[in-house]
Image (tube, rainbow, N blue to C red):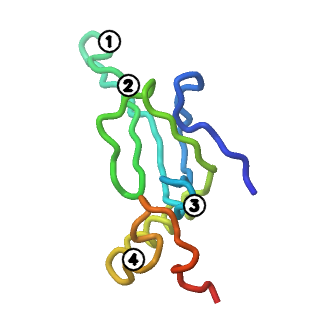
Amino acid sequence: MTARVWILAENYGVTPGFYRVRLVRNGPFVPCRCWIEPSEIDTDTGEATTDERTRLLVDGREVRPFHPPFTTLVGEPITEAEFNYLNAMSAWARTNDPTRPEAFPEFPIDFNQAPSPF
């Protein structure tokens, strides 16, 4: 088991990377990517014309508007390959098998109704 990491928190700032998170207790894991978009620089003056933007992608959807002091998210770090797999799995479940828990990550898994892993 990997250590859980504060992805977003008022006291800890932003930790860019790839993560798996649960949207609800006992829900399926969904992919999450957090990154910082650099500010634009004016070529004439060399000064920043915009602020840096923190971007957050959860289960294939961008979370906007995003205000770090008001958002807390905890997840487990994963590789980019696992991030891509979780994205593909949730997209596949939504289109091909809506009975799978990955199709509706906003709801907890009902272990009495979930398909058997064997």
Q: How many labels does the image show?
A: 4
Q: Residues within 10 Å of mark 1 (few under 14, many from 20)?
A: few
Vertical placement of 81 versus 6: above or below?
below
Q: Which callout, 1 or 2, points to the residue nearer the camera?
A: 2
Gap between marks 1 and 3 measured at Cα: 47 Å
Gap between marks 2 and 3 measured at Cα: 34 Å
Identify which amino acid the numbered label 1 is placed on.
Answer: Glu
Check disc 2 and report its element: helix, strand or loop. loop
Q: Which callout, 1 or 4, points to the residue nearer the camera?
A: 4
Q: Which of marks 4 and 3 is nearer the N terminus?
A: 3
Q: Which callout, 4 or 3, points to the residue nearer the camera?
A: 3
Pointer 2 with pointer 3, Cβ within 8 A = no
Gap between marks 1 and 4 measured at Cα: 45 Å
Identify the residue at horizontal 37%, vertical 71% (top origin).
91
Residue 24 in the image: state x and y as whole percent. Answer: 50, 54
Is 46 situated left or right of 111 in this image? left
Outermost residue to the front? 112
- Quadrant of the image for the N terminus? bottom right
Q: Which of marks 4 and 2 is nearer the N terminus?
A: 2
Outermost residue to the bottom? 118
Residue 52 numbered mark, or none: 2
Q: Which callout, 4 or 2, points to the residue nearer the camera?
A: 4
Viewer-closest of 24 and 31 = 24
Task: Give the residue number, with chain letter if any, for mark 3.
Answer: 26
- Quadrant of the image for the C terminus? bottom right
Residue 32 in the image: state x and y as whole percent. Answer: 48, 51
Identify which amino acid the numbered label 3 is placed on.
Answer: Asn
Check disc 1 and report its element: helix, strand or loop. loop
Task: Give the residue number, with chain letter if any, for mark 1.
Answer: 47
Is 70 situated left or right of 16 in this image? left
Identify which amino acid the numbered label 2 is placed on.
Answer: Glu
Task: Give the residue number, with chain letter if any, for mark 4.
Answer: 92
